[in-house]
Amino acid sequence: MESEDDMQDAYGGESDENFSNENEEEDEEISQNNEPDYGFDDYADDDINPSSRLPQSNYTILSEAEIRQRQDEAISTITNFLSVSNVESGILLRHFKWDVGKVNEEWFSDEDRVRRSVGLSSLRAENLRKPLGENLKCAICFEMYPVPTMKSSPGCGHYFCEACWRGYIHTAINDGPGCLTLRCADPACGSAIGEDMVLELVHEEDRQKYRRYLLRSYVEDNRKAKWCPAPGCEYAVELGFISGAGSYDVVCKCGHNFCWNCLEEAHRPVDCDTVARWILKNSAESENMNWILANSKPCPKCKRPIEKNQGCMHITCTPPCKFEFCWLCLGAWTDHGERTGGFYACNRYEAAKQEGVYDEADRRRDMAKNSLERYTHYYERWATNESSRAKAHLDLLQMQAVHIEKLSDKQCQPVSQLKFVTEAWLQIVECRRVLKWTYAYGYYLPDHEHAKRQFFEYLQGEAEAALERLHQCAEKDLQEFLDGDSWQNSFNDFRTKLAGLTSVTRTYFEKIVKALENGLQDVVQGQGTQVGQPSQLGQGSRRR
Amino acid sequence: MSESQASLLLRKQLKDLSRNPVDGFSAGLVDDSNVFEWNVTIIGPPDTLYEGGYFNAIMSFPNNYPNSPPSVRFTSEMWHPNVYPDGRVCISILHAPGDDPNGYELASERWSPVHTVETILLSIISMLSSPNDESPANIDAAKEWRETKEEFKRKVSRIVRRSQESM
């Protein structure tokens, strides 16, 4: 069958470089794309990264220390260009949201205007200072103090005593990040108070808070940076450039995989709007879904309840029943996959509906309206693929932490030769994620776009079938080598099979991601005969 | 600034104001044991609708005065676009700098520790002479002030008369 051929082609053509060179290649690409190279190598070498197969976006993960380093670099750049002090550079950069280019541009087009709007006087306090020895009344507490003990901002002559300054700055710091743009306490003045003065005057606790705000400002004010949204994660993400369109999937060093644009979890190839609608829909429908999506399903043959606690959709009921079925459509597993010449089709809502599969076993047709049923179909597949992805991610970690060593001992293979197992699991995790989001896509694909829907379901079906084969091989076949004493020869066969399946699955998913990202445009252009014969269309696009 | 510093500063201002009274208002404590609650009487400024009125108000100072502003509430009946129906005065210098995340008011118009009882009350007197109907606290009063000035005038002269009666 066609998939067998694919497997051979793909394996023969791509596998070598995939196994040995992939990481080096990525490294090179990245350092070419980014002129300033900040610790990207660590990131690319990270094996846990489940998106290692996505085309690399131009972004950098920054730790706190790296954020400080970026700030220092920006400040020293401005200090050199504008011949101002570091403190003044900081004030300018915070005002212009850490955009070095913008600071330069504005400064050299109208220095006076910039100085006025940020509160940097070109006068120096030394020249304004009253003669030494004279006493001055602090305009806040109305006490007299000798001038040398009083302070003013560097650019104005509004002297206040240290205690009043401390109280003023303390209040500002406790009011929030607005303290970074603090001005002189005289309301008519507006002269900026820089970090040197703040840090010199306040107590340690306030000093730490203020430093925290300084650090945060680089990420929170900067259009090109954001915090990783994972709970407790302290990394920030900085984009190298901002492009108008495209996908922004980002993998943080903490392992969280999210969309830079909408901060939801990564959802390539589906766009942010669809994701937002889908998530809103899920929260609105969740009450209805509670009873439908109970944690178990009855075995279609013996009716005993079964809880799904492993990754793939191939369920085998416990003896004596031993019925093998598909978790999603509850049909016999023998109807799935190419072995029977059959065709994996349980991703198709229409097919299932037309055959009347839902009429018999499922109560939900009786109890729910058609729209809910349709939603249920997609939601269930979305949710099941998510739990499958989560499980696969845990399996991957377990594989890396424990099983690879064990396998290496059992099969007398060096760990470096077992990379194909990790590769397979990385591919599974990523594909489960993509597959999950294709169900949100499918839900919002208009019914009247028959050609698109047909093509979409064809691509999804092929991808899903490939993934099920891969997942089963990685989960079940591998277990035999971990548990038992299969011989080395069969292990080599297993290697060929798993690596081949990984590669084939990758090809299918690349195809569907590409097709969905360009809105299934191919169908619109080629509308006509081809669409009626999806398998030919599939072949054609594969050879491209 | 600790509470004792706040009360020292308030006592100092009280002493100054009793020695050198300022035209347009008089000020004292609600209760001599509490320097954070002031009872003030604002005299309706000449050549305005409020001329001749004696309006009582209470100023409540926070413990961290002068780093945070006091609140001012008229106890006399008041009809003004910038005074809430319950008597609270809404002017920008009584707002802490952090209070206005939208940047609606300029930082220089908001609270600063250099403000005193005197500068606050002078601002309120100036508010009585020129209402700001851009961001009204009392929407009905603002609407009347803008659209049916005669009705507004009638209401104000009524509260002026009542303030004189209750003196």
Image: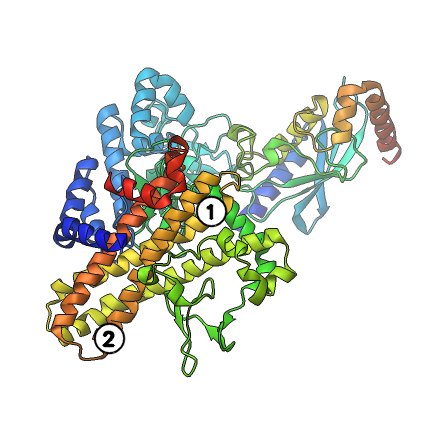
Are labels 1 and 2 on one chain? yes
Horizontal arrangement in the rendering, residue A252 relative to residue A280 (left or right): left
- Please report whichever mark, 1 or 2, sits nearer to the chain's N-terminal start: 1
Question: Which residue is rendered at x = 68% and y = 31% of the image?
Answer: B21
Tell me the SS state at disc 1: helix
Query: Which image quarter holds the C terminus of chain A?
Result: top left
Q: Nearer the viewer, residue A420 or B40?
A: A420
Question: Which residue is rendered at x = 69% and y = 30% of the image?
Answer: B136
Which residue is labeled 1 in the image? A442
Mark 1 crowdedness (10 Å alpha carbons): few <14, some 14-19, many ≥20: some
Question: Which residue is rendered at x = 71% and y = 22% of the image?
Answer: B129
Q: Quadrant of residue A56?
A: top left
Chain letter of disc 2 in the image: A
Query: Which image quarter holds the N terminus of chain A?
Result: bottom left
Let me know if residue A479 appears in the view.
yes
Q: Which mark is residue A292?
A: none
Which residue is labeled 2 in the image? A480
Report the amino acid beneath label 1: Gly
Horizontal arrangement in the rendering, residue A278 relative to residue A518 (left or right): right
Mark 2 crowdedness (10 Å alpha carbons): few <14, some 14-19, many ≥20: few
Q: Give the percent coordinates (x, y) of residue A164.
A: 46, 41
